[in-house]
Amino acid sequence: MTNQTTMLRGRLWTGHIMSALPGLFLLVDGGMKLVKPALVVEATVQLGYPESVIVGLGIVLTVSTLLYLIPRTSILGAILLTGYLGGAVATNVRVNANWFNILFPVMIGALLWGGLWLREVRLQTLIPLKEE
């Protein structure tokens, strides 16, 4: 194996790990919204949303995350999740949440896109990063 092949494999595996971590987190989050335990209902209502929207949010989050995790639709999933996470940031800013709660969706989005860039040649072509 050449150094370039080893580097490409390492990049691919790093991308899969970077994608899996937020993917699993978002799947659990979406699943919790579908099940609606008291903790999720309470947190959502405290953010100013009625209980009636929780299942809808769970469906959107779960479907978007599944699209992200399927290689053929991963870019579409990343775009949809970016919108979802942007809404999470806006919600936390609106309720004057602490900085961690505001920046956590940004960090999840960075992991999503970073992992996708590492594992998706089409995205590397669209957004080339220069090597020096």
Image (cartoon, grey):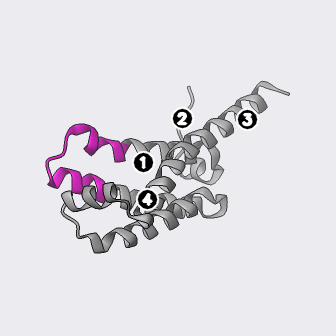
Give the CA distance from mark 4 to mark 1. 20 Å
* Residue 50, image x, y percentages: 23, 70
Q: Which residue is mark 2?
A: 130
Asked which quadrant contains residue 15, the reply is: top right
Can you tell which of label 1 and label 3 is closer to the viewer?
1
Q: Secondary structure at mark 4?
A: helix
Residue farthest toward the front in the current orientation of the protein: 38
Q: Is residue 45 left or right of residue 80?
A: left
Can you tell which of label 4 and label 3 is closer to the viewer?
4
Q: State the residue at coordinates (18%, 50%).
A: 93
Q: Is residue 104 magenta?
A: yes
Rendered image: mark on residue 9: 3
Residue range corresponding to the magenta coloring? 87-106
Dot 4: few (<14), some (14–19), or many (≥20) neighbours within 10 Å? some
Give the CA distance from mark 1 to mark 3. 23 Å
- Rendered-image quadrant of the C terminus: top right
Asked which quadrant contains residue 130, the reply is: top right
Disc with the residue nearer the chain's start (1 vs 3)? 3
Q: Which of the pair 109/50 is nearer the observer?
A: 50
- Dot 2 amino acid type: Lys
- Dot 1 amino acid type: Gly
Disc with the residue nearer the chain's start (1 vs 2)? 1
Can you tell which of label 4 and label 1 is closer to the viewer?
4
Can you tell which of label 1 and label 2 is closer to the viewer?
1
Q: Which residue is mark 1?
A: 109
Q: State the residue at coordinates (44%, 66%).
A: 34
- Dot 3 amino acid type: Arg
Q: Is residue 90 magenta?
A: yes
